Image (tube, grey):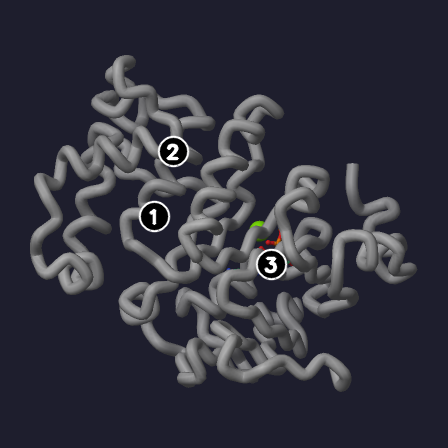
Amino acid sequence: MGGDRIEKASILLAGSDLAKSFGGVRAVSGVSFQLREGELLGIIGPNGSGKTTLVNLITGFLKPDAGRVHYRGRDITGWAPYKIVGLGIARTFQMVRPFYQLPAYKNLVVPLYSPRVKAMTGGKYGERDSVALDLLEEVGFERDSYVSYKVASSLPQGYLKRLELAKSMALRPDLLILDELFSGLSLAEVASIVPIIEKLRYQGKTIIMIEHRLKELFRIADRIMVLNYGEKIAEGSSDQVMESEAVKKAYLGSET
Ligand SMILES: Nc1ncnc2c1ncn2[C@@H]1O[C@H](COP(=O)(O)OP(=O)(O)OP(=O)(O)O)[C@@H](O)[C@H]1O
Ligand SMILES: [Mg+2]
């Protein structure tokens, strides 16, 4: 990592020497990275390589055994998730987590009532239900189909993933972390979500995308970081990382 000096002011998020073990499993081991404001960083790696654990370390769902997380130059290591959300870091979950009994749009009530949104809007959100419906429309819930009013338990995976995205967008984050948003979706569904992510970037959001759908990720990511057995084994442009011998080796035999 010696060579890549980046102007300090533009770094939004930095992890240094992060480590987390579960029993004997070193899920994340000595991982350092930096993320510039406005950047889209892709994180890839075989199953079990530590991607979700790294997200949990950044977002406060897990405390690291070692290492630090800095956001806007501030040490946020070990902060509680709700405090980290308050700073403007939102995430989606690989396993969707809706309130299944509630209509889709009511799922957005929790983030829309969050202290962060309250503070940012000065209490003037507009009518919450209509804000929720607008957000769902933005992520592809067709306004005329009434799908936004259906209980989450009745929605197919494609909509649940979109709902997950809308929940994180409702928090008005500066940094969005998307953990396998595309998994379980058809090519057509992925193609319809990509422009939403591109739009978020034009709005100035910084994004981390964890993905197994490499083709789609490589098209939109600025930079790729590769994990394997908890360690960072490569970082750079998509071409650079795919040319790396360590990456070829990691993916051979471990991916179907
Ligand atoms: N809460 C936990 N308790 C015990 N082991 C865990 C826990 N969470 C993750 N692990 C282990 O840590 C390692 C990394 O898991 P992690 O979920 O971070 O990988 P991942 O890269 O996100 O994988 P995937 O691509 O399948 O989502 C795995 O060996 C996993 O079994
Ligand atoms: Mg994962």
Q: Quadrant of the N terminus?
A: bottom right
Residue 38 appears left or right of 44: left
Q: What is the three-letter code of the residue carrying label 3?
A: Leu
Name which quarter of the figure residue 87 lies in: bottom left
> Earlier along the polypeptide chain: callout 2 or callout 3?
3
Q: Residue at x 20, y 31 (%)?
A: 102
Q: Quadrant of the C terminus?
A: top right
* Distance in Å between CA atoms under marks 2 and 3: 21 Å
> Earlier along the polypeptide chain: callout 2 or callout 1?
2
Residue placed under numbered mark 2 in the picture:
139
Q: Residue at x 30, y 55 (%)?
A: 172
Residue 122 appears left or right of 181: left
Looking at the image, do the residues carrying marks 2 and 1 touch, with CB atoms under 8 Å apart?
yes
Residue placed under numbered mark 3 in the picture:
41
The disc placed on residue 42 is none
- Residue 122, x across and y down, in percent: 10, 61
Q: Residue at x 69, y 58 (%)?
A: 224
Name which quarter of the figure residue 133 lies in: top left
Q: What is the three-letter code of the residue carrying label 2?
A: Val
Residue placed under numbered mark 1 in the picture:
169
* Distance in Å between CA atoms under marks 3 and 1: 18 Å
Position of 152 relative to 71 (above/below): above
